[in-house]
Amino acid sequence: MTEPPDIDQRLTMFELMTDMRLFEKRAYDLFLQGLVKGTSHLSLGQEAIAAAFGAAMSENDWTFATYRGHAHTLARRVPMGPVMAELLGRDNGLMRGKGGSMHLTSVPHHMMGSYAIVGAHLPIAVGAALSASYRSSGQVAVCFFGDGTTNIGAFHEALNLAAVWQLPVVFVCENNLYMEYTAIGSVTAVARPAADRAGSYGLEPVVVDGNDADAVYAVAVAAMSRARAGDGPSLIEAVTYRHGGHSRADPGKYRPDDEVAAWLERDPIVSYRARLIAEGVDVALIEQIEAEAKAAVDAAVAEATAGAEPSADLLEMHVFADGGSSWRN
Amino acid sequence: MAELTYRDAVARGIAQEMTRDESVIMLGEDIAGAGGVFKTTVGLLDQFGPRRVRDTPISEQAILGAAMGAAMTGLRPIAEVMFSDFFAVCWDIVANQIAKARYMTAGQVDLPLVIRSANGGGSRFGAQHSQSVENWAMSIPGLKVVAPSTPEDVVALLAAAVRDPDPVLFFEHKSLYASKGEVPDGELVGELGQAAVRLQGNDVTIVALAAMVPRALEAASQLAGRGVHATVIDLRSLVPLDVTTVAESVTATGHLVTVEENPRLCGWGAEVVSIVAEECFYDLDGPIVRVTTPHVPLPSADALEDLAMPSAERIVAEVLRALG
Ligand SMILES: Cc1ncc(C[n+]2csc(CCOP(=O)(O)OP(=O)(O)O)c2C)c(N)n1
Ligand SMILES: [Mg+2]
């Protein structure tokens, strides 16, 4: 279908996945230390999908992600320091502490937001694609969401509208087999929650191993070029598994031990690392990437913990375009 | 100067802005080929073509979500929600997404969009097609809320809404669509957050919105026959709210009556009253009175709906009560 990624792209994906893994693990540690407040939803185990799209997307393409959006933010090369600082609720955070883990956004990086109401961002991504198409800008909107999202109305409204208007949007369902605590299979009328719905919108069903970065990259490139060619949206179901619970408070006990063990065996980063080495990549280069990722995370934590608390004036800023929140004269 | 219906003023305002700015597009159900179920968008498809005037499926979340995504990425969409009651099926996009994106991202996201909707009662459509929901919008930080009462204001405030950098909910009143008024020729651009004094009188201040403005004026003329001279203020916009115009008038008259279509609890009048009670307390010469619909869903039968909506007679009675 498409040519396999070249070595630079493969190393980029490995680097991105390694960054994501170490970032998420550290975020979890900081949570245990009481430094990261509120909730957050980690992408541990699902990194290959974010990394492959990060490598396949052009700089001006847009990302729309869910509350499980740290990895997708890093995939757009948003610097780790402000992301970590946002999790810590600091003034030097990506959104100065006003959004938090579930709403990571960096418009300069075309990371157009992380959305915490299930399904809401699918129509929003369609709107960005409408804008790209109207302006003939060649941009593509890529929208990531979970398996549980395929049962909410906004999913179906967005798919239909994107298909009717043949818009440049790629919908990526990260099927990690569970919603919060309930298996998707137990509440869904079809076996493949996204792919089995594709036909309803005139789209091809696409299922890919979401733990294989090369495989995801291939379908990503195909979908992106289809979108750019004016051939309309794609719906990709990338099957994966989260290593931990739904959110940080969740130990994930509702999942059978043998199922968890089997998926841990299929760790997308461990297997990719082995593949690259088997295909001749120098171990020293791999180790260098790993060391750099660790140093970047260390630096991000230092930057974040050095950040001040957000200043009080931020409370009433940014409601309206004039910078403030005034609703009366 | 030409006489225009409120309905035709909608198309005129939109056409004015679409002619001026290529980034303005429209989307909604039945708005293009059919010219809108209330015939408010007739002629726009012919004038601006199907790329800019788009019929959508019956997908309110997709319509408003797409408007948001388009606004975030350089367009200035005008989306239509056919009846404002239908906001209930897409309120997530309005209240959680559109209203909050700028704040949550510390100002990274621009949302220059307008959502137009047919609002209000008096058409015998029953409880799911008659509500006045401008107070829903008013209660959400991050939205601007406009509700014109005259054809001239429809044109001028629509233009202001399209040019505004923030999301504006633009409530057109169904029972005003057939009303007529003089509209000046040429480009019209109003200002959001400026109330209009429709009638000047020294005895009482009546504050109204949308279809309640002509109702209040009718009441004022009945009151004049009894020697009571009312000021009638058309708020025009709830957010931003022109407190100054209201407070200045109350200071002069010493009495305030608000007239709203919202059901009793938490209608916009309650907010206006609370501000005036706090800021003009020592200027008041009597109790402030709110005229609202009772706290019931709107019934369909004409006799019952007329009973529910504030009538000129009820306004007169309430004003006289306020004056003591
Ligand atoms: C409309 C809505 N309903 C419920 C929730 C609560 N909730 C948050 S995440 C989640 C599970 C979503 O599952 P899925 O789409 O598979 O995504 P995953 O978390 O597995 O990535 C639920 C039910 C919500 N945020 N929004
Ligand atoms: Mg899931």
Image: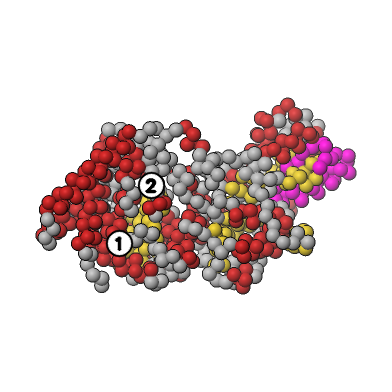
Q: Which residue is mark 2?
A: A104
Instruction: Locate the N terminus of chain B and report the quarter of the image it occupies.
Output: bottom right
- Seen as rendered, the residue at the extreme top is B282
Report helix, strand or loop for mark 1: helix
Q: Is residue B186 left or right of residue B17?
A: right
Q: Residue at x 67, y 38 (%)?
A: B243
Q: Which residue is mark 1?
A: A56
Say which of A167 and B75 sits in front.
B75
Percent coordinates x, y for residue B316 in the rendering:
80, 42
- Mark before the other along the chain sequence, 2 or 1: 1
Q: What's the image's color scheme?
A: secondary structure
Residue range highlighted in magenta: B200-229
Name the amino acid, label 2: Leu
Q: How many marks?
A: 2
> Which image quadrant is residue B86 in?
bottom right
Q: Residues within 10 Å of mark 2 (few under 14, many from 20)?
A: many
Name the amino acid, label 1: Ala
Q: Residue at x 72, y 61 (%)?
A: B186
